[in-house]
Amino acid sequence: MHQFSRAILQRKQQEPKVKRRLHFYARGEHIPLVAQGVWEVDEGRVQLSTLSPEGEEIWLGWAESSAFFGNWFSVLSSYQAIALTDVRLKWYSLAEINNSPYIAQTILPQLVRRMRQTEILLAISGQRRVEVRLQHLLLLLKREVGEPVAEGIRIGMRLTHQDLANGIGTTRVTVTRLLSKFKNEGAITIDSDRHIILKHDSFTNVADW
């Protein structure tokens, strides 16, 4: 069993059982963030981002099942969370976290993973060629939210061309052109639900961080 999974299991076994209310948000909804506590994802996936001074979205990472997120983890004034799928969340106050070593032990590896995601997204944004930025982003998504299918690895969330453009700091038209190029080259396919599928040997010309 993965070390992170063992930590979650240990917490669930050792922590006193608390009946916690579930909060539901639909795909595309902004999730409210306040300083007095944090959310834990019970089911679904959340996009974490900030806004540039020009109002453009900058990706910071993703929160999935058992991941924690909230203003408490960030110094950014425009930190925001958007439901990428329908999500089910649990709320924890800062007092609970400070008084529970089990919750604190679970949060730490989550923060490390998120820090790594943010570092890679920062490194991707520093690539000069837009095509390379998009290739790196697709490889990151493949690793972080990929689901094995017969054709390769399916990115486990449906992203619009504008979403991908926001992720690498370019235009939707440019992303549409590049995705068409990747598709013609056989590096990717699009399934009936408009999810991107990367072939196992896609983009071997770039380093996969």
Image (tube, helix red, strand yellow):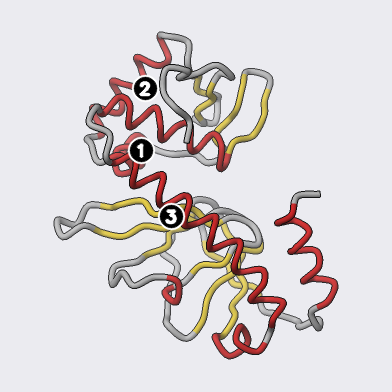
Q: Is residue 172 above or below residue 115?
A: above
Sequence-wise, the earlier of marks 1 and 2 is 1
Rendering coords of residue 99 (x, y %): 65, 89
Query: According to the image, label 3 marks what residue?
Result: 28
Q: Are marks 1 and 2 in contact (CB under 8 Å)?
A: yes
Sequence-wise, the earlier of marks 3 and 2 is 3
Rendering coords of residue 93 (x, y %): 56, 85
Residue type (three-letter) at the residue carrying disc 3: Gly
Viewer-side label of 3, 2? 2
Sequence-wise, the earlier of marks 3 and 1 is 3
Q: CA distance from mark 3 to mark 2?
A: 23 Å
Q: Is residue 88 left or right of residue 3?
A: left
Residue type (three-letter) at the residue carrying disc 1: Leu
Query: According to the image, label 1 marks what residue?
Result: 164
Rendering coords of residue 6 (x, y %): 78, 59
Q: CA distance from mark 1 to mark 2?
A: 10 Å
Residue 131 occupies which quadrant of the picture? top left
Residue located farthest toward the top when viewing the structure as drawn: 185
Q: Is residue 173 left or right of residue 64?
A: left
User: What's the residue at 63%, 76% (across, down)?
Assistant: 104
- Residue 179, numbered circle: 2
